[in-house]
Image (tube, rainbow, N blue to C red):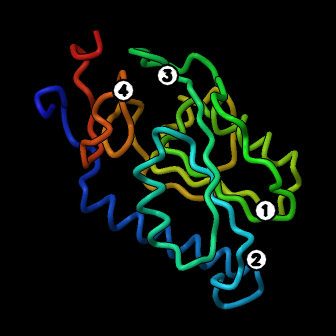
Amino acid sequence: MHADLERTLVTREQIAARVAELGRQLADDLALDFGTRSAQSGGNVVIVPVMTGALVFTADLMRQLPIKLSLELVAVSSYPGKSMESKGVKIASELPQDLAGKHVVIVDDILDSGQTLGVIRELIERQKPASVRCCVLLKKPESARKRHVAVEYVGFEIPDAFVVGYGLDFDGFYRNHPEIAILKLEVTK
C-alpha cells in the first residue's frame, strides 16, 4: 500500500492532536447552546456523519465529546469507482428524520467541490433544527469549490490533490491507512 502513496500530508500524530482540539471546541460551542458550562446534560445533539469516508474521523471525534448525543448516518456517493472528480451527489440512504429543535453536527471527511455537504446541510436545515454545524477533517482551496457551503470546523487545509487514508479512499481502498497521503497518479489509471 505504501508504494502507491506519493507522500504524507498529515501524520497520525497531527490528526490525533487536531481531532482532540476539534472535540474540545465543539463541546464548548454546544455547551453555549445549552446555556451551561457543559453540554453533558444536553441530549439534543445529533452527529450526522457522511458515510463512508467520515467513518474513522467521526469515531475518533465522538470519543472526544463528553456529551450525551445520538448518531444518525447518511450514506452518499459522489466519487463512484475509480473516479477522481465528483460526479454529483447521490444520497444512498434515508436522511435522518425528526431533527427539528435538535443541535445537528454534520461530519464529513473532506470539503472539496462543496456539492455533497451543501446538499446535506440544505436538506437538514429544512427540518428546522435548533442549530446546524459542519465539521470536516480536510478542506481544499476555494478554487476547488463548485458550491459554497458554510463549515464551522476544519481540521486541516490541504492542497488540491487526490488524498487517501484515515477513511478516505480510491476505488474502495486505502481507508485503513492511518495518515492522510497523496495517491500516486499512476495508481489511478
Q: CA distance from mark 3 to mark 1?
A: 29 Å
SS of the residue under disc 4: loop
Q: CA distance from mark 2 to mark 1?
A: 9 Å
Left or right: 94 as drawn, with respect to 173: right
Q: CA distance from mark 4 to mark 3?
A: 10 Å
Q: Which residue is mark 2?
A: 33
Q: Which residue is mark 1?
A: 131
Look at label 3 and name its amino acid.
Tyr
Among numbered discs 4 and 2, the one appearing first in the sequence: 2
x then y, percent, for residue 156:
42, 52
Mark number, residue 75: none
Q: Which residue is mark 4?
A: 172
SS of the residue under disc 3: loop
Question: Which residue lies most toward the left here?
Answer: 3
Among numbered discs 4 and 1, the one appearing first in the sequence: 1
Mark number, residue 79: 3
